[in-house]
Image (tube, rainbow, N blue to C red):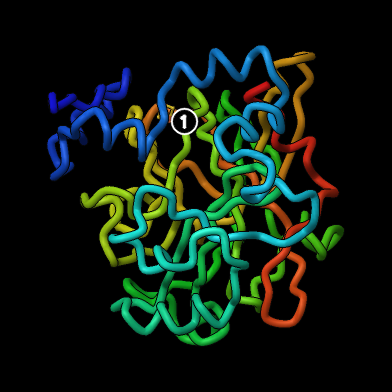
Amino acid sequence: MDDMKLRPAPTPESALLSSIQTTSINRRQFLRYGFNAAGGVLAATLGALGFASILMPPGEGGGGDSSVLFWAKGREEEAWYGAKHLQPMLKSDFVTESANSNIGMAGAQGVWNGLPVVVNYVPHAQNSDSPIADNSPRFQEMAGYDIGKNYVGHATEYLLGNPDVFDPSGNLVMIFSRCTHLCCIPGWQLVSNSFTADNWTPGGADDGGSKLFCICHSSRFDPTAIEVNRNINRSNGATFDYLGIRRAGGPAPVGLPIIPIIMNGDSIGASSEYTGWLTYCD
Ligand code: FES
């Protein structure tokens, strides 16, 4: 099987690629982990829900309800949730898995109504009263900026008016997993490099691990850095603001949207109230 070199990001940050330990993957791995940028072209002819349903067909997480399922297709042997493919996500699964992390974090790829998502467990409640320090992860409410570096808003202010969108005390965040660059699917620890390592630094910077890493052109997103952001609906050109996680590095222009979590006992579900935030790949 031929090896494929990861395409460098078309920015000066491509120099960072020298720090990536995994710089080539085979074709099967590329298709499995990153899908490909052509997906973005295909998505242009379909709605976000339609495109995602091609990736994750109805009946496999496209069931039309609020529950979120684990998605480990092709990674049944490697992922900690491999044996739970298409089973409902339980918060207790993440709590148990977090004991295997040096910093108490856990994450998994999932599917919700045919859409690819990543869910992260962050020990916010345990750490938020202690001084902020390396490897003491907690959610950070931060100022957000648009593509032109203009201030959009602050997460704390946003959450005062919209507390149902994200509750840090629940120790969970759900993220729509379509890259804001060219719509590949960033996963959680699908490849091993400095950006996906089991460590954490504060401030939403790009110098620690625990990032969602997009394998297509190496964009990085910090699931603990919560900010207001602005993106463009490619169907109608309208801009929209949303609560998301921070783009830490790479060619992606902005961060990824948060999908509000609805807990049903131990089961992780999602709200469909903010699907307009997920339309940038249309
Ligand atoms: S699609 Fe290019 S970095 Fe994600």
In terms of secondary structure, where does tag 1 sit?
loop
Locate residue 210: give its quadrant: bottom left
Q: Which quadrant of the rendered structure holds the C terminus?
A: top right
Q: Tell me the residue at 69%/29% (across/down).
A: 48
Q: Residue at x 34, y 53 (%)?
A: 75
Which image quarter: residue 53?
top right
Residue that mark 1 sits on: 184
Is the CB of the residue bearing disc 1 within 8 angstroms of ligand 1? Answer: yes
Judging depth in this view, the residue of 31 and 131 nearest the camera is: 31
Percent x, y of residue 270:
74, 59
Q: Amino acid at mark 1?
A: Cys
Query: Residue 96: image x %, image y %?
Result: 44, 84
Q: Is residue 48 above or below residue 143?
A: above
Name the one closer to the observer, 149 or 55: 55
Is 173 placed left or right of 195 in the picture?
right
Instruction: Note whether 195 is above or below 104 in the view shown.
Output: above
Q: Is residue 210 above or below residue 22?
A: below
Q: Check disc 1: other Cα within 10 Å, few if <14, some if 14-19, many if 20+.
A: many
Residue that extends furthest to the front in the rendered view of this protein:
59
Number of numbered labels in the structure image: 1
Residue at the image position 47 percent from the left and 37 percent from the top: 185
Residue 42 image offset from top left, x and y in percent = 57, 15
Q: Position of residue 2 (x, y in %)?
A: 13, 24
Residue sitting at x 66%, y 42%: 114
Ligand 1, seen in the image, is in the quarter at top left
Q: Is residue 74 left or right of residue 19?
A: right
Quadrant containing the N terminus is: top left
With 272 as the anchor, is 21 left or right in this view?
A: left
